[in-house]
Amino acid sequence: MHNYFITGGAGFIGSSLSKRLLEEGNKVIAIDNFCDFYNPKIKDNNVKELEQIDNFKLYRADIRDRQALKTIFEENNIDIVMHLAAMAGVRPSIENPVLYQEVNCMGTQNLLEEMKAHNVKNLVMASSSSVYGNCKEVPFREDMIVDFAISPYAATKKANEVMTHVYHKLFDFNVIMLRFFTVYGPKQRPDLAINKFTRLMLNNEEIPMFGDGSTSRDYTYIDDIVDGIIKSCNYTLNNKMFMKY
Ligand SMILES: NC(=O)c1ccc[n+]([C@@H]2O[C@H](COP(=O)([O-])OP(=O)(O)OC[C@H]3O[C@@H](n4cnc5c(N)ncnc54)[C@H](O)[C@@H]3O)[C@@H](O)[C@H]2O)c1
């Protein structure tokens, strides 16, 4: 049993992961700023049941606030960090790249520094399939060159991968970066296609079609993502990591 610090713990993936970890007897410390990227009431709802559980502790705070992170590390004996807090979404990042840079890059930098300061070196982190950009070769492989991001969001995730590698090399961090492909299932973010399609169908409305209908995309079910995250955390906790694609 371990103490997990989950950033973005009120979000879609964070709350689903927290639920499973708590069911398995772990302690979960979560941070979330309940930002309005989508309706924060959905996030309140995501944590409602979790907040009834003794082993769940939620900090309503921002990862850009270094002092808030410091307090969390001081008040809790954290074994491993699962870093999910981010501004997600490709299109909105084109509208507001500065915010994406501040949250995804500066927020992550704060987290890495506070982990270093408190000697917490186990980290599993959400990257994104968007780092593959317009790679033509399929299926994508982890060892492909991903230097050609095509959105500010993807660029911040690639930047996170690079910066985290620095902490692995310089400070012995044990890290796994997970490049999620669109996640679906209960509590899915309302901005994502399957959620939108379902809402339109339930309202008997037409689903707008873009392109010629020949595009394809990978989706991953939330329970499989949670399984994968937990396996990655266990691996990180039990193995000394080395650079590996
Ligand atoms: N859902 C997907 O399909 C998908 C695909 C690829 C990558 N990802 C990545 O996985 C992670 C989780 O995604 P999700 O779908 O659960 O998104 P989400 O938006 O539901 O969850 C992210 C959470 O982070 C919180 N947050 C945002 N900025 C914050 C800040 N400055 N300080 C503290 N908390 C903050 C939000 O309030 C939200 O609850 C993200 O890093 C996202 O980029 C998700």
Image (cartoon, grey):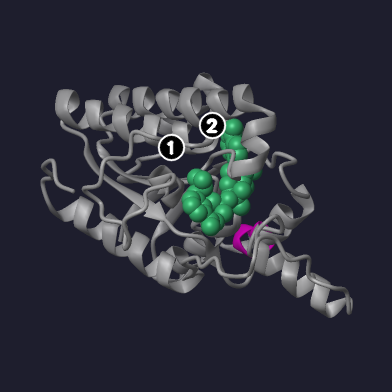
**Res. 157 mark:** 1
Q: Of residues 15 and 26, which is closer to you in this image?
A: 15
User: Mark 1 or mark 2, which is nearer the start of the sequence?
Assistant: 2
Of the residues shown, which amino acid type is indicated by label 1? Answer: Lys
Left/right placement of residue 71 relative to residue 87 reads left
**Mark number for residue 152?**
2
Main SS, magenta region, reads helix
* Spot occupied by residue 245 in the image (x, y as percentages of width and height): 18, 48
Q: Say which element carries label 2.
A: helix
Residue 184: say if magenta: no
Magenta span: 47-51
- Confirm whether the magenta stretch covers residue 48: yes
Rendering coords of residue 191 (x, y %): 70, 55
Whether 25 is drawn above or below 180: the answer is below
Marks 2 and 1, how far apart at CA: 9 Å
Whether residue 96 sits left or right of residue 244 in the image: it is right
The answer to whether residue 75 shows anywhere in this view is no
Question: Mark 1 packing: few (<14 Cα in 10 Å), some, or many (20+)?
Answer: many
Task: Establish whether ligand 1 lies closer than 8 Å to the Cβ of label 1.
Answer: yes
